[in-house]
Image (tube, rainbow, N blue to C red):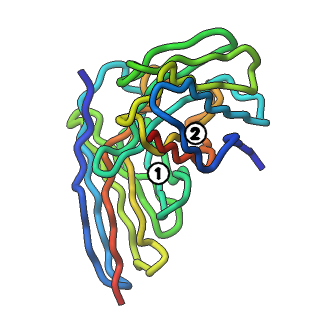
Amino acid sequence: GQSLEQPSEVTAVEGAIVQINCTYQTSGFYGLSWYQQHDGGAPTFLSYNALDGLEETGRFSSFLSRSDSYGYLLLQELQMKDSASYFCAVNQAGTALIFGKGTTLSVSS
Amino acid sequence: DVKVTQSSRYLVKRTGEKVFLECVQDMDHENMFWYRQDPGLGLRLIYFSYDVKMKEKGDIPEGYSVSREKKERFSLILESASTNQTSMYLCASSTTRDTEAFFGQGTRLTVV
């Protein structure tokens, strides 16, 4: 079978750093993606890791360890607008995209 | 800009009706996906297609079928709608070479 585990909720204050972890168990693993979804909106792509290591895109970074079947999304200098749901997703055999249940991030002032 | 368009934003149907949800993408993407999203359950894959007339079952295909007669269009069909199919339905597309999937705005279906 396949499964992805991530925390259901995370809270933080503006300016803080937050790490959202994701562990996965799947076959045909190609890479790990992260998506952001605001209330009432569509999921939008944030990052993708195919190889071990850290990928940085502005305030957001994503990390992957294939040997540990583990990754995380790191959000720095948090802003109120970062309040959203964040989903890790496994790119499987280049076609199917399997999502975790999502982490709701609440940023307060 | 890549655009994935779902035919309806909100839909109310009666139990037992046959329901069609349409999705069109304008970027010549090979892959198209249908997900349903429910609170606390994330996005669950119903079906996906990697080419015209090709389809693969996802994690929860029961009660659904799909059709892909043209590359740009992927339809989700509820053969006989039931109340437990009340949900948000999201369509997405991607290229075979690309890692990014683009989502439509979703169709909130209520079955009464």
Q: Which percent across, then down, holds residue B41? A: 30, 44
Q: Chain of mark 1?
A: A
For label 1, the residue is A35
> How many discs appear?
2
Q: Which percent across, then down, holds residue A3? A: 25, 32
Q: Residue at x 31, y 46 (%)?
A: A101
The numbered disc on residue B2 is none
Q: Residue at x 65, y 29 (%)?
A: B95
Per the image, label 1 sits on a secondary structure element best described as strand
Callout 2: 10 Å neighbours few (<14), some, many (20+)? many
For label 2, the residue is B101
Instruction: Using the rendered view, name the quadrant where residue A66 is placed.
Output: top left
Q: Nearer the viewer, residue A43 or A26?
A: A43
Amino acid type at circle 2 is Ala
Q: Is residue B19 left or right of residue A78?
A: right
Task: Tell whether label 2 touches label 1 (CB within 8 Å).
Answer: yes
